[in-house]
Amino acid sequence: MEKAAAAIGDKLDKGSLPVLFAGTSLTAGLGLDPDSAFPALIERKADSINLHIRAINAGLSGETSAGLARRIEWLLTGPGQIFVIESGANDGLRGIDVEDTYTNLAMVIDAIRDVRPKATIFLMQMEAPPNMGAKYAKAFHDMYKELAYDRKVWLVPFLLEGVAGKPELNQADGIHPNAKGERIVAQNVWRAIGPVIVPGLSVK
């Protein structure tokens, strides 16, 4: 396992693999110390298997998919071999048309591919709140699967799996994970992206 991780690092300048996490307050780690946000936790998980990545936290609180589509060109001026996209949660909260969210996220993926054609891209499944109604929630959920299939990107299971709706794992707002919940979030993400970055990696 360590040899596989090291082999990836050998192909990159100084053995560092830049991973850009583009997202909302959930990626930024709102209410937490920056070192406790899940991108930083994933960097430490990778380091523990001798895979030296540099997690670039590009989370922006309150951002919609349209906002990410507007700033992706700027984000692409920086480094990035792997892109993890966490976007759309605020669209769901606002009841934005699902087709618009699809279009915006497709624009983000296409922009990355235009500039970094060999990049590995992950799209995180997000969910709409139940108060938006069952029809909207289903369409919102299915949109991520369709987009991942259409654009041939890796779909990461729901970011807040095992955390959403559990008061003991969230801050007072009931939306953003606390430090304990964030560790579960990091494991959710690492379980999905780790075996892609390091083929054969077993993540429990």
Image (cartoon, rainbow, N blue to C red):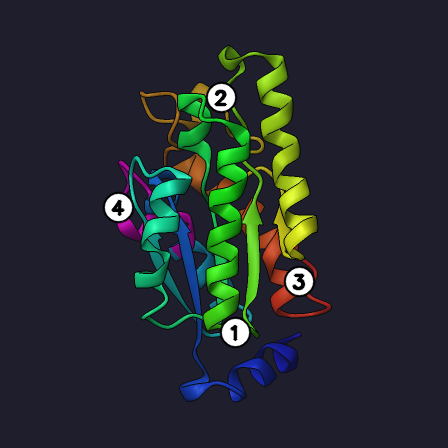
Mark 1 Cα shell of 10 Å, populated few (<14), some (14-19), many (≥20): many
Instruction: Return the mark for residue 51.
Output: 1
| Residue 20 located left or right of residue 118 | left
Find disc 3 in the rendering and name its residue.
Answer: 195
Whether 33 is among the magenta residues is: yes
In the rendering, at what x and y percent does residue 195 appear? 66, 62
- CA separation in Å, label 1 and label 2: 32 Å
- Closest to the camera, between mark 2 and mark 3, is 3
The tag earlier along the polypeptide, 3 or 4, is 4
* Region in magenta: 29-39
Q: Amino acid at mark 3?
A: Pro
- Closest to the camera, between mark 3 and mark 1, is 3
| Residue 155 located left or right of residue 95 | right
The tag earlier along the polypeptide, 2 or 4, is 4
In-front residue for pair 76/46 = 76
- CA separation in Å, label 3 and label 4: 27 Å
In-front residue for pair 53/19 = 19
- CA separation in Å, label 2 and label 4: 21 Å
The tag earlier along the polypeptide, 1 or 2, is 1
- Closest to the camera, between mark 3 and mark 4, is 3
Find disc 2 in the rendering and name its residue.
Answer: 166
Mark 2 Cα shell of 10 Å, populated few (<14), some (14-19), many (≥20): few
| Residue 44 located left or right of residue 63 | right
Q: Is residue 1 visible?
A: yes
- CA separation in Å, label 4 and label 1: 23 Å
> Residue at (50%, 26%) from the top-left corner?
164
Q: Amino acid at mark 2?
A: Lys
In-front residue for pair 57/116 = 116
**Secondary structure beneath label 1:** loop
Instruction: Return the mark for residue 33.
Output: 4
> Is 80 located above or below residue 66 in the figure?
below
**Secondary structure beneath label 3:** helix
